[in-house]
Amino acid sequence: MGITDITKKYTNGEVTVVWKPACCIHSKNCWNDVTGMPHVFNPFKRPWIKIDADTTEEIINQVKQCPSGALTHYMNGEKEAKKTTGEATE
Ligand code: SF4
């Protein structure tokens, strides 16, 4: 399996952050002090995403700012939620 195939997942039980290292363009958006959340995303630590270090909402906001698509997310149990709540509110 080459590096292009690697997908890592980090979950806090509510949201799952998916990281594809082959897509990362190392923009540092997610971990620099200005636009990032270095207390959550820290490539010098393992695991490099500390999924419990901030709220689900904040983490999702950060993931959405990844310019390369290397970071994506999905809500755990999204299918179940859709069934019970109908349409998403956003
Ligand atoms: S924001 Fe995305 S592309 Fe930039 S360093 Fe983080 S994971 Fe890589």
Image: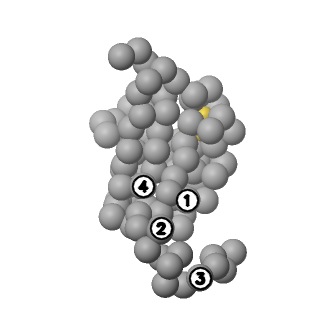
The residue that mark 4 highlights is: 16
Marks 2 and 3, how far apart in space? 11 Å
Q: Nearer the viewer, residue 49 or 9?
A: 9
Direction from residue 6 to residue 35 in the image, left or right:
right
| Label whose residue precedes the other's in the sequence (3 or 1) | 1
Q: Is mark 2 within 8 Å of ligand 1?
A: no
| In the image: residue 84, left or right of residue 1 | right
Q: Earlier in the sequence, mark 4 or mark 2?
A: 4
The image shows residue 90 at horizontal and vertical percentages of 69, 75
Q: Position of residue 49 (x, y in %)?
A: 40, 45
Tag 1 residue: 60
At mark 4, the secondary structure is strand
Kind of residue at disc 1: Ile
Q: Are marks 4 and 3 in contact (CB under 8 Å)?
A: no
Q: Is residue 53 above or below residue 32?
A: below
Q: CA distance from mark 4 to mark 1?
A: 9 Å
- Using a 10 Å C-alpha cutoff, classify the residue at mark 2 as few (fewer than 14 neighbours), some (14 to 19) or many (20 or more): few
Query: Of all residues shown, which one is farthest toward the top?
Result: 2
2 or 1: tag closer to the N-terminus: 1
Work out how far the residue at label 3 is from the one at label 1, CA to CA, in angstroms. Answer: 21 Å
Q: Identify which residue is drawn at 41% across, 15% down.
A: 2
- At mark 2, the secondary structure is helix
